[in-house]
Image (tube, helix red, strand yellow):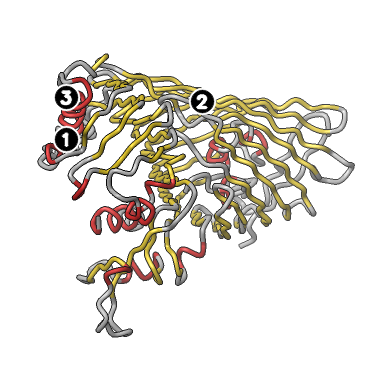
Amino acid sequence: MRLLIAGFLLFPLLLNAQFQLGWRTDTYAGINSALVNPAAPGRTPYSWDLNLGEVSTFLANNYGYLRETSITQLLRNRDKDLDVFFARDLPSDLNSSDEVLVYDYFENNSYYGQQLNSILGPSFSVRVAPQTRIGVFTRWQTLFSGKGLDEDLGFYQWDAIPSQQVFTLDKFRGAAASWAEVGLNISQSIFTNNGELILGLSARRLWGQRAGYLISEEDFSLSKLPNTIGLEGTDFSLEAGFTSNAGNDDFDDSPGRGWAADIGLIYRIDLGDDFYRWEFGAAVLDIGSLLFKESELHRFNSDQLATTLTDSYNNLDTEQGLSQAATQLSEDVFGDNSISRVSDEFNLRLPTTLSLQATYAFTEWAKIEANILAGIAPGGASLTRNTTLALTPRIDRHWWSIGMPVSLYAMNDLRVGLAARLGPLFIGTDQLGAFTNSKQLSGGDFYVGVKFFPLGLNRNGSKKNKKRSGRRGSGKNVECYKF
């Protein structure tokens, strides 16, 4: 258990965010902003942008945490051989000056966990007509998501349940997948009597590398056997699917294929200023799924008492552990080790998300933006996202910007972030507190990237006159750096 919790919390943090609201709400984010709303690149002031690379990681959970530490401190001690203790087992003679890692568990009514690692590869967008912009992006990501885990599965609650006492577990679902994708983004502006309507679409081709999921479709009864020798359950309906390569480290194989789409719009209101005072946006992201072949799909349904998770599960092979566990569970439930397997392929839906935005601009370069990102993935085999509410005050200039998102994650985790862009470099986090000393470090996020855009200068050093044609006649000059 020590290795499980420490590994779950530390591994993604030692790599070097989910929606990156401090950065992707930037007026100058270009093709990167398409990942929040596919219409957003259409408001980019310059004619083209090129993203060389962007790396991000995100972790959040309300099950376990590390005490009195931070990501900065973990990175500083990454080469030290620190002792790791469960909070309940801390030695009484431990000195306050001793550097150790201490983990503990939350007690909540239900539990969730989400981990996302993403690489946005070479990507670009270009204005091909005065009101039309086209872009292409490449991305690789791996996502683990689980939600609705019953409170009785919390460490302390589970430990307090007596043996052979029957209790009920609520239905739940969890899934994980890694995939690569190439997307085509198109945004089209339409000028109206009092503003501008921007329509956006991203069509994406997906190559799935590996995946797995487990869902409980109904509440069911469970009891612990004495001396932790197993469990007994009845009236359960479980479904599990996983790729044959889920247990190994080979990412070259791609048994999954799929398509996805993002659709969105932005309406910008002109109140007679030299800039758009209000913006309202809406989008639906990650509409689509992946079909994985070279896989196993199992269903376990029984209204009879079944005994499982006994010593038979203690010596599973590292690479074939999922297949062996499914075979053993089939034997436990049906008395036959193959009857649970119903297919050699499965379909996994993406974490469909509703994205809403509202922006008020105080000046041409100072604004505040509100975002709602709500997971609306249907039931069944699906990746999921928790809901995020955010408010981001920001300043966007041509050569630099800064934003400070204040967000509420999963409706119970208040966070403050910070993002900055200077020339081609951008960097940020949506959870700044994870980098300072935290009493309960249960996650964090970080992103960094490099992108290029027009310098705004011609060869003799004078400013280029970049005006946007359309209903408003002459557009605005884009601010340029003065050497």
- In the rendered image of this protein, does residue 452 appear above or below residue 182? below
Q: Residue at x 88, y 41 (%)?
A: 271
Instruction: Give residue 151's position: percent from left, percent from top.
Output: 44, 47
Observer-nearest residue: 168 or 151? Answer: 168
Q: Which circle, 3 or 2, is nearer the viewer?
A: 3
* Distance (Cα) linking label 1 and label 3: 15 Å
Quadrant position of the C terminus in the picture = bottom right
User: Residue 124, image x and y in percent?
Assistant: 50, 35
From mark 1 to mark 2, how far is it between C-alphas? 29 Å
Classify mark 2: helix, strand or loop.
loop
Task: Spot the residue most to the front.
Answer: 165
- Report the front residue among 137 and 129: 137
Image marks 1 and 3: residues in contact by CB distance under 8 Å: no
- In the picture, measured across the screen, residue 272 lies left or right of residue 205, that is right
Q: Which residue is mark 1?
A: 321
Q: Secondary structure at mark 3?
A: helix
User: Which is more toward the observer, 165 or 180?
Assistant: 165
Q: Is residue 251 left or right of residue 263?
A: left
**Amino acid type shown at disc 2:** Pro
**Residue bearing the label numbered 3:** 331
Q: Nearer the viewer, residue 475 or 250?
A: 250
Mark 2 lies on residue: 378
Can residue 329 be seen from the camera position used here? yes
